[in-house]
Amino acid sequence: MPLVAVLGATGTQGASVATRLLADPTTYQVRALTRRPESAAAQALAARGAQVVRADLNDAGTLGPALAGADALFVVTAYWPSLGPLGRDGAGEEELAQFRNVAIAAAGTPTIRHVVLSTLPGCAAMSGGKLPVPHCDYKQRAAAWIRDAHPGLWARSTQLWVGWYTSNLATVMRPVPVPVPGNDDTSKSYLLALPSRGDALLPMAGDVGRNVGTLVEAVLRTGPATTGGRPDRRLRHGDAARPRGRRRPHQNHGGRRRVAYAEVSDAHMARLHGDVGAELAAQFRWSEAYPDWHGFAPDRTLGLAELGLEEGGRRGRWWGSRRRSGRSRTKSSSKPILGSSPPSRRKGRTRRGREKRR
Ligand SMILES: NC(=O)c1ccc[n+]([C@@H]2O[C@H](COP(=O)([O-])OP(=O)(O)OC[C@H]3O[C@@H](n4cnc5c(N)ncnc54)[C@H](OP(=O)(O)O)[C@@H]3O)[C@@H](O)[C@H]2O)c1
């Protein structure tokens, strides 16, 4: 049974992956990697059947032993916690070093056959340097470094682009209660203030707790066809949703509430929230200019159907739902993860293979 090492298993994305894989104990073993194996979150994972192993992305020496014997690896790195102490580029440099550390360890672990890297689009490169967003750009710099320094590992890797967490609207960017003209009951009036035009599109990831795990499991199950020996094969999840769409009655904690939307200037965001505000503003402005992640590299991007998944769900189309259907377009999706034949033998089944054969 394949053993999947999961970084960030006590956090949002990694927990989603660990939860999904732990739900299938006859198919996967999970190794949760954490800096604090004794923490309640890590112990909860252990109670659900995960191995819990100490690993620190900033401490390269911990990573090799933590990956020993793993068949697959999910990588998510930390940017935001270092933003305060290190600044926007300093946090990015640290994140780049984290990717390097784990890539070197993974490349030195012969059992690893598939790596899923949680990255984001390269905003500076895409905008010709006009709209840099360090927490995205350093992830793409890291991907480029892995591609150049460890091509063998890169050929076994899939990038996953996760859209803006919908849960941010209940946490870091939650609407605040304010009196709104036309609504006398201020207890039910909220203001959502973001550094973005009201009609802009924002790629959102829906229910991250479920969707990330669903996607990563599908990528692992599909196996080499998601890498296909193709250096730039990547998957992004997240659909476009309009921030202003949140103006409709907003259901929260049971009541119907009125939410008004206001655009905040970038400068005001930075004044209010320092580097975090500046970084968020940069991300939103970039999203205004480049809303369509699906169109960035269509020939190099996997769709949900190729993974045997379907978009949809109870609450709207950006709430992707898990479907393990047999209706996938690729034969490879029905193969068990990590049991598939290597990329070279599967050439004809990848899009590139099909293109070459034409
Ligand atoms: N928020 C969004 O809307 C959004 C959207 C797309 C992408 N992202 C990206 O998602 C990433 C963060 O992922 P997340 O939201 O899942 O994180 P999170 O919920 O904040 O949790 C952080 C996780 O990272 C682990 N971690 C932190 N520093 C570590 C280190 N030095 N070594 C090993 N593990 C470490 C923590 O584990 P322990 O504490 O147990 O060690 C924890 O499990 C960021 O890179 C961000 O840019 C965020």
Image (cartoon, rainbow, N blue to C red):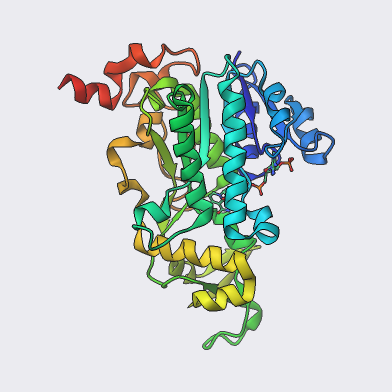
Q: Residue sitting at 63 percent across and 70 percent down? A: 274
From the viewer's side, name the closer residue of 57 and 6.
57
Q: Is residue 254 above or below residue 238?
A: below
Quarter occupied by residue 110: top right
Residue 23 is at least partly visible in this image: no
Tell me where residue 154 appears, x and y as whole percent. Answer: 45, 27
Q: Is residue 141 above or below residue 255?
A: above
**Number of on-image labels:** 0
Q: Residue sitting at 66 percent across and 57 percent down? A: 86
The quarter of the picture where the N terminus appears is top right
From the viewer's side, name the closer residue of 308 and 263.
263
From the viewer's side, name the closer residue of 100 and 338.
100
Q: Tell me if 152 is positioned left or right of 35 in this view.
A: left
Tell me where residue 193 appears, x and y as whole percent. Answer: 54, 74
Quarter occupied by residue 225: top left
The quarter of the picture where the C terminus appears is top left
Q: Tell me if 80 is positioned left or right of 216 in this view.
A: right
Residue 268 is at least partly visible in this image: yes
Tell me where residue 176 appears, x and y as whole percent. Answer: 63, 74
Q: Is residue 305 above or below residue 353?
A: below
Tell me where residue 122 appears, x and y as whole percent. Answer: 42, 49
Q: Tell me if 288 is positioned left or right of 90 in this view.
A: left
Q: Residue sitting at 62 percent across and 33 percent down? A: 101
Q: Report the residue that reaches farthest toward the left.
A: 358
Q: Report the residue that reaches farthest toward the right.
A: 38
